[in-house]
């Protein structure tokens, strides 16, 4: 993902703490490379994790990344809806509003 896709605060964070961000990126790549899941599936799983943490920024990021890897709007939404019995409807509803931020772009 290019820097212009990141929120402004993230560009600041990269500039101020570049070594940390580089290490996190390296860790993420190692996690992706360690198993057989395709990129789309991996981002949908990470999206579900972000939803359970109620991390709006991570939901935005992984929804965008899943879509860039070929997920449809419906697949991204379904990843959230599947969590209804796990995290409850209010959490899923919040996540769907954050996903809509991305799907509406």
Image: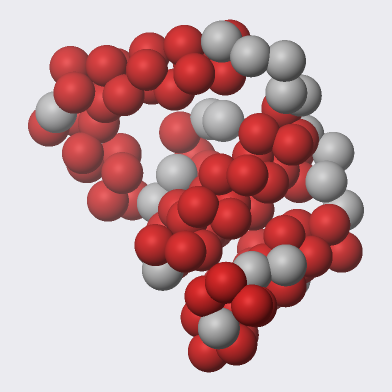
- Say whether residue 92 is left or right of residue 20: right
Q: How is the image coloured?
A: secondary structure
Residue that sits furthest to the left in the current view: 16
Residue depicted at x 50% and y 52%: 49
Q: In the rendered image, is residue 65 in sight?
A: no
Nearer the observer, 40 or 45: 45
Q: Is residue 97 above or below residue 52?
A: below
Image location of residue 9, percent across then percent down: 27, 51
- Say whether residue 52 is left or right of residue 43: left
Image location of residue 34, percent across then percent down: 56, 10
Residue that sits furthest to the bottom in the current view: 90
Q: In the rendered image, is residue 8 in sight?
A: yes
**Quarter assignment of residue 35:** top right
Q: Is residue 52 above or below residue 32?
A: below
Residue depicted at x 40% and y 51%: 7
Q: Is residue 62 above or below residue 15?
A: below
Quadrant of the drawing holding the C terminus: bottom right
Residue depicted at x 47% and y 64%: 52
Image location of residue 12, percent across then percent down: 22, 41
């Amino acid at each position: 993902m290019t820097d212009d896709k990141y929120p402004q605060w993230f560009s600041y964070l990269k500039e101020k703490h570049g070594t940390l961000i580089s290490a996190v990126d390296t860790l993420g790549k190692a996690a992706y490379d360690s198993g057989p899941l395709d990129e789309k599936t991996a981002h949908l799983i990470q999206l579900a994790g972000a939803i359970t943490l109620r991390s709006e920024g991570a939901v935005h990021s992984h929804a965008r990344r899943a879509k860039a890897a070929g997920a449809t709007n419906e697949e991204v939404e379904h990843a959230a809806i599947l969590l209804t019995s796990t995290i409850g409807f209010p959490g899923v509803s919040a996540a769907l509003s954050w996903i809509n931020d991305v799907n509406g772009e």
